[in-house]
Amino acid sequence: MSTQTDPAPGAAGRDERRAGRARRVPQTAVEALAVIVILVMMLHVTVNALLRTYFDSPIPYTLEIVEYWYLPVVAFCGFVAAQSRGEHIAADLIFHRLPHVTRPYVMAGGAVLCCLCAAGFAWWGLLEALHAFEIDKTAGVSDLIAWPPYFLAPIAFGSLTVQFALAAVRAVARRKNEQAA
C-alpha cells in the first residue's frame, strides 16, 4: 500500500490542485459527451443495419444523421480534448537541438501561431454557421435539419484559441519561474 504525499505543501499546493480540478471538469465533460455520442451512434448504426437486413426497413436518414450530427460532435470534442490533455502529435525534429534558453519562446511562438489559426477558423466557422442558420440548411437533399452542428466549429476552435493562448503564456511563465529559482 502506498501513501500519497502532497508534492507542493501549503497554499501553493492547494492552488495547484484547485487549478488542476478546474481544468479537469470541462475536459471530462467534453470527453463524456464524445463517448456518449459514439455509443449512441454505434447503437443507431447497428439497429439500422439489423432493421435493413432482417426487416427491409432501415431507419430514415441514418447516413445523414451520422454525417451531419454524430461525426462533427465526435471530431470537435476530440480536437478540444486532445489539446486539453496535451496529446496532439508533436514532431520535434529540431526543437531538442535548440538552446534551452530559447525553447520556451519557440514553444510560445508556435502556440501563438496556432492560436491565430484557431481564431481564424473560429471566425470563419461562425460566419458559415450563421449562413447555414439563415438558409435553414438541410442534410443533402433530405429535409433533415443540419445547421445546428455548424455551430460546433466556432465553439471548438474558440476553445482551442483560448487553450493555445494559455499554452503560450504558460511557456513563457515557466521560463521566467525557472530563471527566478
Image: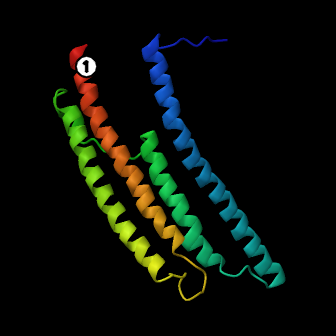
Residue in front for this viewpoint, 98 or 5: 5
Please say whether residue 20 is visible from this viewpoint. Answer: yes
Q: Nearer the viewer, residue 113 or 16?
A: 16
What is the x, y in percent for residue 83?
A: 42, 45
> In the shown orientation, is residue 54 left or right of residue 119?
right
> Is 33 placed left or right of 129 in the picture?
right
| Nearer-the-camera pick, 152 or 179 | 152
Report which residue position mark 1 lands on: 178
**Side of 170 where 3 appears, left or right:** right
What colour scheme has been applied to the protein in the rendered image? Answer: rainbow
Q: Quadrant of residue 15?
A: top left
Residue sitting at the far front: 134
Q: Give how far across and how far down residue 79 sits, in percent.
A: 45, 53
Name above or below for residue 103 compared with residue 74. Answer: above
Q: Is residue 8 visible?
A: no
Numbered-mark total: 1
Report the residue at 50% width, 53% height from top.
78
Is 121 on the left-hand or right-hand side of 1?
left
Where is the N terminus found, in terms of image quarters? top right
Q: Secondary structure at mark 1?
A: helix
The location of residue 36, given as percent across then percent down, is 66, 54
List the single residue furthest toward the right: 55
Looking at the image, which residue is at 42% across and 16% down? 12
Mark 1: few/some/many CA within 10 Å (<14, 14-19, 20+): few
Q: Note whether 134 is above or below 157 in the view shown.
A: below
Does residue 123 lie above or below 17 as drawn? below
- Residue displayed at 50% across by 23% down: 17
Q: Residue furthest bottom?
A: 141
